[in-house]
Every structure is written in structure tokens, then in C-alpha cells.
Amino acid sequence: MDHTRRSLLVGAGALGAAALAGESQAHGVDPNGGGVMLSPEGWDAEAPPELVFLTEARVQLQLPPTTTGAGPGGQRLIFNVTGGTFDGPHLRGHVTEDAGADWVNIRADGVGDLDVRFTWETHDNALIYVHWHGRFWSGPEDAEYAADVTKADDPDDAWRYYFRAAPQFETGDPRYAWLNNIVAVTKSRTGDGGPIHRFYAVL
């Protein structure tokens, strides 16, 4: 069997051979920045997708939010993004100030429809536009706790609410162009002045 690993070097726009040491799954993210790597080894078309942790973003929001009041589709809350940081094995840098917002629509059933857009600047000066839609909800008894971004970070109690999204990335920087072509998800929580998002590539 040919165990040669094929790497999808999206940043360079070409396929090349590369070794993915220590990985058992068929797909992975190159730790050296080459993008998503593909391999026949370990491939199972019926297995569920795997996740690779990319980075954790801690976003700061302007409080209180702007609200347009209760409209026909729910109550709109607009949180301007004032900054933040992101750090992880594949992406690190800071969230640019005044270049994004969380547009949250609270539906009649209490579920938050998320519409988020902001810009990242990486440690090596690449600009990345990040945007997504998602859902935020909890039981009535936990709604105030879940929405309180001013509380201390409390990851152990984040089970009390559901906070998930499907981000997309856009950049013209060739070093990070592989982000343009992946599907990603977040597992998020609230605290320390804003949302805390853990980003995973879906492989």
C-alpha cells in the first residue's frame, strides 16, 4: 500500500507530498502552516468527521449593547467588538478594534440567532475576516447567567447553555489561504467581558 501523504497546499494552490507524523486520521492540519493535509491512510467514508483545534478567541464587547427593540422577528441586540486576542496551535494574534460586531436577534422562543462579523490580525500581520451564524440558548432558569458576559470565565458551568456557530474565514494572504477552503465550528461560552470561542476545523 502506498502510504505517501498528500498535502492540500491551498495557500500555494497545488498538491504536494508531505508527511503527517503522529496523526491517525486521514485528514489533518499541517502544523507548519501548509494547510489541510489529505491522506488515504485511515480513511473511512462512514466515520463521523473529525475536529482539529485551531485557536481560542477571547473577544471584548462594548456594553451595554444597542437595541432596536422588539420587532416582528424578535429583539435585535448589537454588540460592537472593541478588541480581543486569539491564540492556538494554528492561529494567534489580536481582534482588531472597531472592525466588527455581534448582531444577535432574540427570537420569541428565547433562542438567540447569531450574526457575527469581525477582523483578526495575526502575529505575522495577516488580516483575516471571520463571519458566522449560530445559535445561543438555555433553559429559562439559566438565561441570565448565560447572557452575562461580565462574569468571570467559568468553563465548568458552560454546560448550562448552548452556544455554537459555524464560522467562515476570508483572507488574501497566501500564508493563510487554506482557511478560505475549510468548514469550521465553534464551541463557545461567555465571560471576562465577552464571548470565548474555541475554533475547530472539520476534517
Image (cartoon, helix red, strand yellow):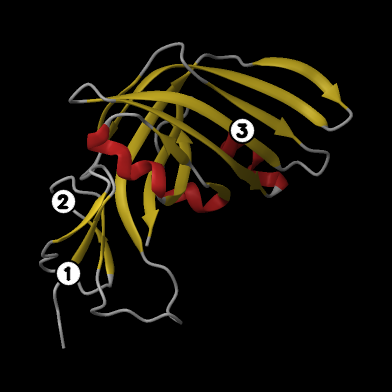
Disc 3: which residue: 115
Of circles 2 and 1, the one toward us is 1
The crowd level at tag 3 (other Cα within 10 Å; few <14, some 14-19, many 20+) is some
Callout 1 secondary element = loop
Position in image of residue 177 (x %, y %): 31, 39
- As drawn, the residue found furthest toward the right would be 72
User: In this picture, is 155 found above or below 85?
Assistant: below
Q: Residue placed at 12% from the left, 62% from the top? A: 18
Q: State the residue in front, 42 or 199.
A: 42
Type of amino acid under label 3: Asp
Type of amino acid under label 1: Arg
Q: CA distance from mark 2 to mark 1?
A: 14 Å
The crowd level at tag 1 (other Cα within 10 Å; few <14, some 14-19, many 20+) is some
Residues at circles 2 and 3 in contact by the CB criterion of under 8 Å: no
Of circles 1 and 3, the one toward us is 1
Position in image of residue 151 (x %, y %): 47, 29
All told, the count of numbered labels is: 3
Which quadrant: the C terminus?
bottom left
Q: What label sits on residue 31 in the rendered view?
A: 2
Position in image of residue 106 (x %, y %): 74, 34
Q: Earlier in the sequence, mark 2 or mark 1?
A: 1
Q: CA distance from mark 1 to mark 3?
A: 38 Å
Q: Residue placed at 25% from the left, 50% from the top? A: 35
Disc 1: which residue: 5
Of circles 2 and 3, the one toward us is 2
